[in-house]
Image (spheres, rainbow, N blue to C red):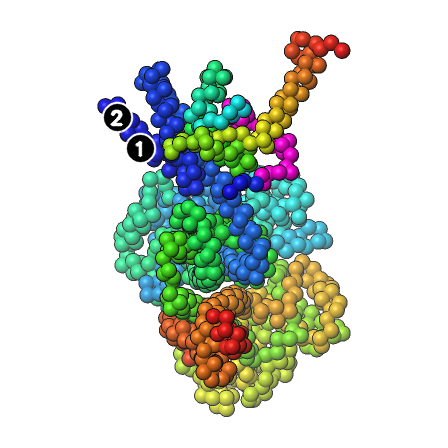
Amino acid sequence: MAKVDVRAGRSPDEFLPLTPALFHVLLALADGEKHGYAILKEVAERTNNGVVLSTGTLYGIIKRLLADDMIRRSAAGSNERRQAYRLTSFGRSVALAEVARLRDLVMAAESKKLLGHPSKG
Amino acid sequence: VRDRNASASDRIYAALLRLFPGDFRAEFAEEMQADFRDQCLDADRIGGRAAVVLLWIRTTIDIVHRACVEQLDVTKRDAVYALRLVRRNKLFSATAILTLALAIGVNTTIFSIVDGMLFKPLPYHEPDRLVMLSSVRLAGDYPSAMVPKSLAVAVRERHSGLSDLAAVFGTAPLTLVDGAKSTSLKAMAATPNLLDVLGVTPVRGRLPTDEDATSPAAGALLAHATWISNFGADPSLIDRVLRFEDRRVRIVGILPANFVFPSLDASTADLMIAVESPFRGPEIWPTEGAPAPIARLRPNMTLSAAQAEVDALAANLNASLKDWAPPGRQRFRAQLMELQVGLFESRRSVLWTLLAAAGLVLVIACVNLANLLLSRTAGRNREMAVRSVLGASRFRLIRQLTIESGVLALVGGTAGLLLARWSFDFTVRSVPPVFALFLPDALDSRALVFSALATGVSVLLFGAVPALRGSQTALLAGRHERRRIPVLRRLREGHVLVTAETIIVTVLVISAVLTVGSFGRLRSNSLGFQSDNLMSIKLTTRVVQSARMSQVLATVTDEIRRLPGVVSVAAEDTNPIGTVGWSSGQARLPDGKVASAHGVSASYFQAMGLRLVNGRLPSEGEWQGEPLAAVVTERVALALGGAQSALGTSIQILRGDRRAIVIGVVSDIRYRYDDVQPRQVVFIPPPPDRWVAPGLLVRTSGDQSGLDHRIRAVLARAMPRAVPELSPVDAQLARSLALSRFQAQLFGSFAVVAVLLAIVGIHGVLAQTVAGRTREIAIRMALGATSRSVRRHVVTEGLAPVAIGLTLGVVAGFWTVQVFRGYVHGVQLRDPLFFIVAAAIVTAAALAATWIPARRATRIDPATILKTD
């Protein structure tokens, strides 16, 4: 049975700001579907062990993302032991909205000369 | 080894996962376990054992934390769902919430009233170390306020475990003379060390000393409120001597604002005057008995050890003291008790009875709620089954149902607390004087905690059964077992609930009928005089010399009689109305018994409206002259051989050893409504030196506006320093009904609430039964049963458990009424009439409750029902 996007019509902005852990999970899924352990490893490697998720936190996040329809289980990548997850288009737009929010923040910091690289013009 | 470690690790991890809610586990446990296994292998490969240990620590903390978050999340969802249910089923919710609110309201109110007397630590330093030495009647129940003085002296001198002994004496009005102005203050007397023993320090000044007690201007402590209201919080009052009309008092300190004396009589005193300790030696306190001493247990001394020492001291005193008996009284034993117990001992059983009755109301409410919830759970079998099929565990279902009960309880409990706030203010006003010590001003935090606890206990009581039952049904259904809770079992459950409820209601109604009946009977007691339009005036003065008093009173009486609106005026040597066991003087009757001898003016009989039974009422001249004349009540006349032969008899008046000749007999008199027997009174002309506490009685024509003022003016001219107390006799008499009225009011309201709840409960059970048996009734009707017979059938069925409950309740009530022994007067506790009335009330309530479901049953249309099946 095809899933209906129940979140259709909801704005990604409602979910902002994302917690760092949740954002990292979305990022990990941005380039393709992964199962839980792969997400854990990817996040740890990408942040140079700066963000180390535990299984409890990870699946708490996965539960929320599933409930909010930001990710879905992927039948193709799953086996009997492991479930793979992939980003939905809604999840992708939420991640992009967060990126935009962060970019605005960085730009604001730059214009205040906080970063020492004053923007020209 | 590695494999074994791995499987142990798996098992521990799986155990940790159990902290998560069931549905979370069902969804993710397997994946989590696999991921964690991989994490462990990686950690071991890269960082060895240390890394694995670190991973375990991190994971454990994380899981505990996340599990809490997830559990809270589920709870929140359940609560939101429960709230939605509350809103959707308005009638159900309103009934449940109102039921609980009534019960919690009643209980919180009663708790707040009795708390200070039973539970709340007394407002003194380390109150649990404070003790009181009382005399306990060996044969009977309540302690006396007096103890043998020689024992108290011995305890003070030789007891190793007690502080110095303090004592509280009675109160007296004192008239403060300040230039032209006179103010009456209520003074109480106590030993100088009272505050020291209680561990209370004055906010200003110092504590009185032994020298203060013996000084010509006795040291005194002023109540904070009086200091502010009467002296404008004047700081220079300390060490100043106040002049009262017959004594001088030096104010040595101001009591703390919230201070309450440990004495019912003195709790509202304006000042405490230090008097010498009666426990110092025989020369100071001349009588045999001394007031019950208050003392503090020394550190490391227990109550029982201290009591053993008291017993030993008593045994060492002479034999007659061991079982001390005041003249003409039963034998007593000196007993140390906690101060709170000692202060309220004789009243504790009433307080506990009130609390128990309120508790019964709560039990009824819980029975009702359990039944309501049960019936709803039964109606939700499908929903539960669906949830169960979708993977909800039994625990999860129980939890959801419990949360639903919890939400109802929270709303009901809060409503109950609001109700209690209102009903406390209302109830506290009718608390009789004998219970008016340590009452809170309003509901306090303790009441809040109590109502929360009561609500919590109720949830456990009414929520548990339906939750277990609901989850069980759901699981059965979930396993596709076609078994259902049989209708018969539901019926039996309903019947048990109704029976239990009826027992409790019957007991409460019997209590109510008894207390209300007692109140009614006392209220209808014939006083023997006309109390309406009668005003009594107490003349609290000591300056008018007794010899001059007769003269002054005669003048005052004359002047007041001439005021407009006054019908008659009389003078009396004391005012016995409203007092217990009063006696201003005594007369010996021929049978050896002693009657009260009451000194009154000749106009007294007319002013009181006493009915002449035989002989004549005295003229002014006859009352003044010789030989001494007397008028007796019927009861006295009976002892003199009847109303006829009493006339002309000579009676011995004990004070002054005079004899008086009976010239008239008047109707019997009660000075209080709760006087079980009329008093035996001999009226005589007041002996000139016997104006103990003079008073006036004024009968008015009804319209009294401005009369008070004019009477005060007359009195002010004749006795400039007197501070007269004017009060309607009806109000004084009402106070003698205060305890009875209070009991009747409370038990009456308990019964009303209980009956209402029972009607709701019985109706609920029966309505369900009818709903569950629609088919059967339809068949009966199709087979020719008339609606009358159907109605009768339903009513009979509904009343069967009521009849059982009523029978058991009457039996229980027969036994329960014993708790009222000593507190309910004027009636037989086991008067069958009360039981009959109570049974009739309960039956009527049950009939009312069965009527609606019975009518609904007859409206069943057999054709429709049988066709749809």
List x then y, in percent, for residue B134: 38, 55
In the rendered image, residue B643 lying in the magenta stretch gets the answer: no
Question: Are the numbered discs 2 and 1 placed on the same chain, yes or no?
Answer: yes
- Which residue position holds label 1? B11
Q: What's drawn in magenta, residue-wise?
A: A5-28
Nearest to N terminus: mark 2 or mark 1: 2
- For the residues labelled 2 and 1, the Cα–Cα distance comes to 12 Å
- The chain containing the residue under callout 2 comes to B
Q: Is residue B364 above or below residue B236?
A: below
- Which residue position holds label 2? B3
> Looking at this view, is B124 or B677 the one in front?
B124
Type of amino acid under label 2 = Asp
> Looking at this view, is B185 or B178 the one in front?
B185
Q: Is residue A37 visible?
A: yes
> Which of the two marks, 2 or 1, is nearer to us in this view?
2
The residue depicted at 55 percent of the width and 83 percent of the height is B667
Q: Is residue B439 visible?
A: no
Type of amino acid under label 1 = Arg
Find numbered disc 1 in the image and state the secondary structure of the residue it sits on: helix
In the rendered image, residue A25 lying in the magenta stretch gets the answer: yes
Q: Quadrant of residue B600?
A: bottom right
Which residue appears farthest toward the bottom when viewing the image?
B644
List x then y, in percent, for residue B383: 47, 54
Q: Is residue B798 above or below residue B242?
A: below
